[in-house]
Structure formats: structure tokens, C-alpha cells
Amino acid sequence: MYFTLAVSAATPERCAALVGAAQGTDPRIMPIPGPAQVAWRSPDQRAAVLCWPGGRPSGASHAGTIWADLAVRGPATLCARTGLAPVDPVYLAEIPGAVVVSDRACWAAAVAGRLADHDPVMVGAFLSLGYPVGAATAFQGVRALGGDRRLRVTSGTPVTSRAHDEQAKGDPRAGTAQGAAQVAMALVEAVRPLGQASGPVELSLTGGKDSRLIAAALTAAGVPFRARTHGFADHPDVVIAGMIAGRLGVEHTITEPRPAGTPDEADVLARLRSAVLVSDGMLSAFENVGSGVRPDPQRGGEPVQAGGHGGELLRGGYAQAAWRTPAALGAARAAELFRRMTTRRLSLLRPGPAGAYLASLAPSAAAVARGPLPALDDFYLVNRAGRWSAAARQAYLLRSALVQPLFADRVVRAARAVPLRHRMSDRLHRDVLALLCPELAGLPLAGSPWYGEPRTPANVLRVPAALGDWRRDYGEGMAKFLRGYVLDHGDASPMFGIVRRGAAERSLSPPQADAHAVWALATLAALLSGDWLNARR
């Protein structure tokens, strides 16, 4: 894993100054050791591409999203591109006389001099949703490039356009047969290159719907793989994953969870700091993304990790939750779901930041009013997949090579071309599975059945009640530590210029019933105070 930053400026002097700032970036803001080096510089000295750490032979980014157009004559042109689900993010900072493009938001912010300029819109989304929305990042003046976008920057002037003329939209008169065939073909093509991987391919296999689809695609593509499931031997995920592996004849390894216990305050402090560091300030420490702050260099032969992340895109995203109600209630249910999801902790914000956050939601709210279910489908694609998954993916990639075929652009486009009602009903998912590996279609599921099927012991193994989760069920000592951390660091940061202190104190008072709010506040305290820069202490 490495990070890329590109600079395009109106003059060679401006470019040289920004390149110097990029090379002199405080290494504490980067989750892997540096330093940065120039990988490419234009002949006219007005554009450059840097990599962190250096030593990269080409000027292209890790995911191929940022590069220099070497074929252009005249002024050098920098390019960037995102997929329909922009899980490999591109961040853009426009400053006088120049543009900075990077796949790491805080690096762009540091070079642009905006690392301490925090965006209240991101804070509002972080508290209610748990991830940014739209183009907002943790830093004002640094924005995320939207999905399906192409960016070209020449002499410090950016031009953004849609990568494709039309987004794929379903024909309501069409069935799923052709659409399922297109999705199946795209999925097989997405995993086929894994057959040439330098190390083994390991699939994180559960008893659900999505990872078995990846198992089916790997099998159809002829890619050798092994499976791994995390859980106790009698858990439905483990039992059903064993059935799938047995049916396919692949090796299946089970790793049992270690006994859970509440960590001490030092461990929680490290978790808060590292969550900001590895997620670029965009995910709460409630999420399990904070480990592996300084990963060891990947060794040859390490397994490539594959998983079923992104399967909700085949099922209509947030729309499915609103659709599973009587039709007459569907629109009202969708509007209520959107309101509750996006504004559940709005009372934590001061009036100005709350207004700015609500304004950022206005286009999505208007779309929900016009067409509730398609709007919820789009909101999932743009924000849950495009922002939450992008931040989580960056954190996971620090630990190992990760492949998420359901996010592949061809797969997403093919799925979105299928009418929404066929996705929400699980028909697309089931049809693709039947095409790729029909012997897996009849195996039971863990947790919930296919839509429209009754829950019976034959088709669903019930998932037992979850064991205690220390992130929710911590004791009085941890509650006191988190409260003190938020309130003390808030005095040394802009936090209480954005968050209402009284509302925060009420959320942090015993019994701290809303654990997600507590963790979000504590993570924001680490971000806004700058304490996250101590992650490696």
C-alpha cells in the first residue's frame, strides 16, 4: 500500500513550493512510514506526482485512480478517475494558482495548509450517520471527487466531467435474466485476475448471501482459493461456510474469537487515535478499523484477501429496508428512514453547523420526496458505499491485499441496470448465484432468509444472540475515561464551536445509553484536538 499526491500549478515556482510541502509533510499524519519522493515531474516543471513512501517507478496511484497523461502535448495534464461506487477515493484541494489531488485527504490538506480547518458538515454526518456525506471531508477546502467522475488538471485549472455519459438505470419493463447474466459475467471477470496472484487467495466466507456469491464467481473463473471463517464451531456462519466449502471442495479454516474483555484506558486511547489515522478522520473508533497502524511490509506469498463487501448494491441498498413494508406505507417509511438515519443526533450540533449539515442533505431529501426508493438506493451507493466503504477499505488495505469484487465498476454498473424491484426482492442475487454455481443456491442461510421465503430450520440457521460487546457494555471506569477525554480535549480544540457542550455532556452522562454517540464524540475529540497525531506514541 502506498499513497499518491499530484500537484498542478500555474507556474514552476508554485509547483516547486507545493512539492516541497508534500515532501516535508509531518509523517505523523500518514499511517505508513515515509518519506515522500517525486515519482514524476513534467518537463515544464508545472506538474508533479509524488508517492508515500517513495521508490515507486511510475507516477500512478495504488488503485490507478491518479496519473499523469504523458500523451498530451503542451502543458502537462494530471488525470484522476473514480468508479460508480468510488471506494478508491480521490480528494481535491484548490488553492490560489494550483490544484492538489491525492488519494489521502489529510495529505492534501497538509500540503494546502488546511489540516487544522475542520469541516462542520463532516462532523454533522459523522455524528448521525457515522461517515461523511457528499463531497465533505474532515478538512474544509478538501473535497471528495464524486462517483463516476473524470478529472483533468492543466496548469492548475481543474475540469471535472462524468466518466460515462449516462449512469446505468434499470428498464422497468425488463426482467432479470439478461441483467443477471451481465452481472454474473462482470463478476467472473472481476475475480479472474486473481488466478495470477503472487500468493494464495483467501476468501472470508460466512453463511450469508454475499461471500457465497464470491465463492461462486471464483469457482466459475477457475481461480484456486481457500476459505476462512471467524467464529465458534457451532455458529451458523461457521456451519454453513463449512457446507459451502465442502460442496466446492476447498480448504476451510476456522479461527475462534479470543475471549472478550474490556481493554484498559491506554488501549482505548490508542484505538481513538489510530481510528482517525487509518481512516483519514472519517470513521468512528467504534468501527474495528484501528489496528495495524504501522503495518509490516507485505511479504511475498501472503494471501490475497477476498470478501463479499458491497453485496447490498445488488439488493437496492437502503431501499430494501423501506420496501419491506405494505406498499401504502412505503413512501412514508422511506422518508422516515432517511430522516432518522441522517438526523438522529442533530441535537448535538450548534445551530450554524446544523444548518450547514442540513443544507448538504437538501438534494438527497428532495430526491427522497420525488422518488423514495430510488433515492435511498442512490444514497447508499453515493454515501454508504462511496464514503464509509472507501474509508474502511483504505484502513483494511494497510494490513493486507484486499479484493472486493462486488465494488468492481463493471459489476456495479451491470447491477444498477437491473430494475430496482428485482434487486430489492433478492431476485437478482439469486439468479446470479444460480448462473454461477447453482449447487450453492439451495444451501441454507445464516440469519435471514431470501426475501419472500418463510424462515424455517431447513433454509435458515438462526444466529444466536450476540455475546457481550465491550464497545457497548463497558463499565463505569471506561465511561468516565471517555467522558473526560471528550470534555477535556474539547476545551483545547474547536470541538465545542461545532458541538453543543451541554448536549455532549448529556450524552456522556451515565449510563451512556447511546454508545455510538459516545464513540463518535470521543473520535471527534481525537481528530479536532490534534491528539490523533500521537497515534504512534
Image (spheres, helix red, strand yellow):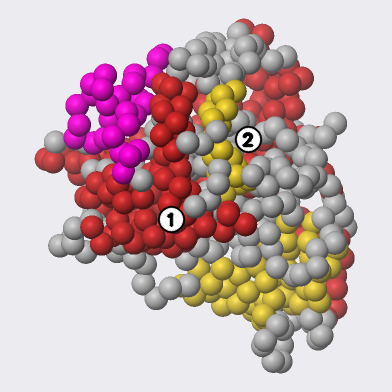
Residue closer to the observer: 311 or 379: 311
Instruction: Give the answer, above or below, for where 194 lies relative to 510.
Output: below
Q: Residue furthest top?
A: 476
| Residue 280 appears in view | no
Residue 503 relative to residue 18: left or right:
left
Q: Main secondary structure of the magenta part?
A: loop
Where is mark 2, residue-wise? 289
Residue closer to the observer: 11 or 499: 11
Which of discs 1 and 2 lies nearer the camera? The answer is: 1
Tell how many labels: 2
What is the number of the mark on residue 535?
none
User: What kind of residue is marked 1?
Assistant: Leu
- For the point 13% across and 41% down, the residue is 327
- For the point 61% across and 65% down, the residue is 65
* Separation of marks 1 and 2 at Cα, in angstroms: 27 Å
Q: Residue furthest bottom?
A: 74
Residue 117: x percent and y percent? 68, 51
Q: Which residues are magenta?
A: 438-465
Dividing the picture into quarters, in which one does residue 315 lie?
A: top left
User: What kind of residue is marked 2?
Assistant: Val
Q: Residues within 10 Å of mark 2 (few under 14, many from 20)?
A: many
Q: Residues within 10 Å of mark 1 (few under 14, many from 20)?
A: many
* Residue 440 part of the magenta segment: yes
- For the point 84% across and 60% down, the residue is 54
Residue 531: x percent and y percent? 76, 34
